[in-house]
Image (cartoon, rainbow, N blue to C red):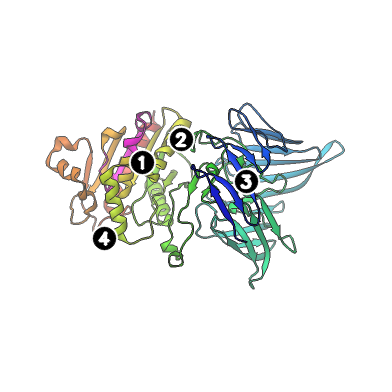
């Protein structure tokens, strides 16, 4: 089928045609107001009350409590813990990292609920990769490679009840087919733009990962993204955004109604993937284009501080995560959150030119905005006694400086920065405090010296106070071009700078 799509001036999908035909209408706040011939009723909090066929109810916190005769219950963190109908009930459990770890399904017999099925989930970081049954037997497992982010489009193999399958994905990361090891189609799937699906299968494979490579719950039809449940029937989230207004004033809108060009990693905010359509020459992993993302190491967090790492140019997601893990090790094993600064996949001169332009114009970019938005979300959640510490390497120093300059002082006053070989040395006037760690010799690391502010600081000690510069000599084991976040030349100063902040906060 040839599918076609039409949009309004706000890049919201108005019409799709091909294997399915749908029309949509929206208001100025990203609420869907019509779908085909059905009109939607939406309240002041952007919750759908009626979609022309079904009525929906909500609690005082904006969580959906009923769809027809199906009822929903939540815990104190607004996580779905129970779905019930007159004859069936399903309960869900979560761990401290907001990962769903268990599901139990019950059937009503006489007046008692009888347990019929239970399963526990397996994760690598925040990414769900499988489940075990009540006997501890692995019944579903997938191996993740490289995709659009999170699990989306990343599976290279799926095992279901001991049968191996090869998944095929579309450009959005939807699983569109499962192949046998011999190349035969075992099961195939078609989706409309918002994820309503058709399954074509001579046998039920039991594959739970379909739309956006996420797990679809058969008991509800909801898609579990990791932090929220998505309802493809109305193109909305079941609950409000845990990050608040980060993605805009509408706390329920799915990718701002642009599902063919955007995706959501965990149910927090949409991201545009303009480069998801890889040309053939770019399909090698090292040439793939990425988008910014946020990912925690998911290890014990500090009580009064959140540590963020943001990388420089020509860095793959895997290398950026390795840097974050290195920083965690330097700090004794505490959690570090990566705010990924994506590589374009192009050659070094092009990436260096990009960094130079960002430093020259001083404008915020997608990654600098994401950096500040995440810092704001942490501060709003943790309160005024919580510090955000940003360790910024190379171009990360440029992105951090540009982000700080555009951010609200109420946020930046709780941000402390440590620049390591920064492409722009970070100004103390932009944040609570700063340390800039650079090589004492431009012959060993030229990058910080491309910032004229560094030269001014070397000539004028009084001027240098605004940058709190620490000059390091190269370690004997360092590379001749000593521009590496994991260089032994900077390890001690990096650890000391951040540990002093942590100790000061943790002792308060």
- Can you give x and y, in whole percent of width and height, for residue 56 in the image? 69, 33
Task: Please tell me whether mark 1 sits on a helix, a strand or a loop.
Answer: strand
Mark 3 against mark 1, which lies toward the viewer? 3
Q: Residue at x 68, y 37 (%)?
A: 51
N-terminal label among 4 and 3: 3
| Disc 3 to disc 1, C-alpha distance | 45 Å
Magenta part of the protein: which range? 403-426
Mark 4 against mark 1, which lies toward the viewer? 1
Task: Tell me the number on the disc at residue 23.
Answer: 3
Asked if labels 1 and 3 touch by Cβ distance under 8 angstroms, the answer is no
Mark 4 against mark 3, which lies toward the viewer? 3
Mark 3 against mark 2, which lies toward the viewer? 3
N-terminal label among 2 and 1: 2
Q: Which residue is mark 4?
A: 479
Asked if labels 2 and 3 touch by Cβ distance under 8 angstroms, the answer is no
- Can you give x and y, in whole percent of width and height, for residue 239 in the image? 60, 36
| Disc 4 to disc 2, C-alpha distance | 38 Å
Mark 4 against mark 2, which lies toward the viewer? 2
Q: From the viewer's side, name the closer residue of 311 and 19.
A: 19
Query: In the figure, 81 relative to 170: above or below?
Result: above
Q: Which residue is mark 2?
A: 377
Task: Please tell me whether mark 2 sits on a helix, a strand or a loop.
Answer: helix
Asked if labels 1 and 4 touch by Cβ distance under 8 angstroms, the answer is no
- Can you give x and y, in whole percent of width and height, for residue 110 in the image? 87, 38
Task: Please tell me whether mark 3 sits on a helix, a strand or a loop.
Answer: strand
The residue furthest right is 110
């Amino acid at each position: 089928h040839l599918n076609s799509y039409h949009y309004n001036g706000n890049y919201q999908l108005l019409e799709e045609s091909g294997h399915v035909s749908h029309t949509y209408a929206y208001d100025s706040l990203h609420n869907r107001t019509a779908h085909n011939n059905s009109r939607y009723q939406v309240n002041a909090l952007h919750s759908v009350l009626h979609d022309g066929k079904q009525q929906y109810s909500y609690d005082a916190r904006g969580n959906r409590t009923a769809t027809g005769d199906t009822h929903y219950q939540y815990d104190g963190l607004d996580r779905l813990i129970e779905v019930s109908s007159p004859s069936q009930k399903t309960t869900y459990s979560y761990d401290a990292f907001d990962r769903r770890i268990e599901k139990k399904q019950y059937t009503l017999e006489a007046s008692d609920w009888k347990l019929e099925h239970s399963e526990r989930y397996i994760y690598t970081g925040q990414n769900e990769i499988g489940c075990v049954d009540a006997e501890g037997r692995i019944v579903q497992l997938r191996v993740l490679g490289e995709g659009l982010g999170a699990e989306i489009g990343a599976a290279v193999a799926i095992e279901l009840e001991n049968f191996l399958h090869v998944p095929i994905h579309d450009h959005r990361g939807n699983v569109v087919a499962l192949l046998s090891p011999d190349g035969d189609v075992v099961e195939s799937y078609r989706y409309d733009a918002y994820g309503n699906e058709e399954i074509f299968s001579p046998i039920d494979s039991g594959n739970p990962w379909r739309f956006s490579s996420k797990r679809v719950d058969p008991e509800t039809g909801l898609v579990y993204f990791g932090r929220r449940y998505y309802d493809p029937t109305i193109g909305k989230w079941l609950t409000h955004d845990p990050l608040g207004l980060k993605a805009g004033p509408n706390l329920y809108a799915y990718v701002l109604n642009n599902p063919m060009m955007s995706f959501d990693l965990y149910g927090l905010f949409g991201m545009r993937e303009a480069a998801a359509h890889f040309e053939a020459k770019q399909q090698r992993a090292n040439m793939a284009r990425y988008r910014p993302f946020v990912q925690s190491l998911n290890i014990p967090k500090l009580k009064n501080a959140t540590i963020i790492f943001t990388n420089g140019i020509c860095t793959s997601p895997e290398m950026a995560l390795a840097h974050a893990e290195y920083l965690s090790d330097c700090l004794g094993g505490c959690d570090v959150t990566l705010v990924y600064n994506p590589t374009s996949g192009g050659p070094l001169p092009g990436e260096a030119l990009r960094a130079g332009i960002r430093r020259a114009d001083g404008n915020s970019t997608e990654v600098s905005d994401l950096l500040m938005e995440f810092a704001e979300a942490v501060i709003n959640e943790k309160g005024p006694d919580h510090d955000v510490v940003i360790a910024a390497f190379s171009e990360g120093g440029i992105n951090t400086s540009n982000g700080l300059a555009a951010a609200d002082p109420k946020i930046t006053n709780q941000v402390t920065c440590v620049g390591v070989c920064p492409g722009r040395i970070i100004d103390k006037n932009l944040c609570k405090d700063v340390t800039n760690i650079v090589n004492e010799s431009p012959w060993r690391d030229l990058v910080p010296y491309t910032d004229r502010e560094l030269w001014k600081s070397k000539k004028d000690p009084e001027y240098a106070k605004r940058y709190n510069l620490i000059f390091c000599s190269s370690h004997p084991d360092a590379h001749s071009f000593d521009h590496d976040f994991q260089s032994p030349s900077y390890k001690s100063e990096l650890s000391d700078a951040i540990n002093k902040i942590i100790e000061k906060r943790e002792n308060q």
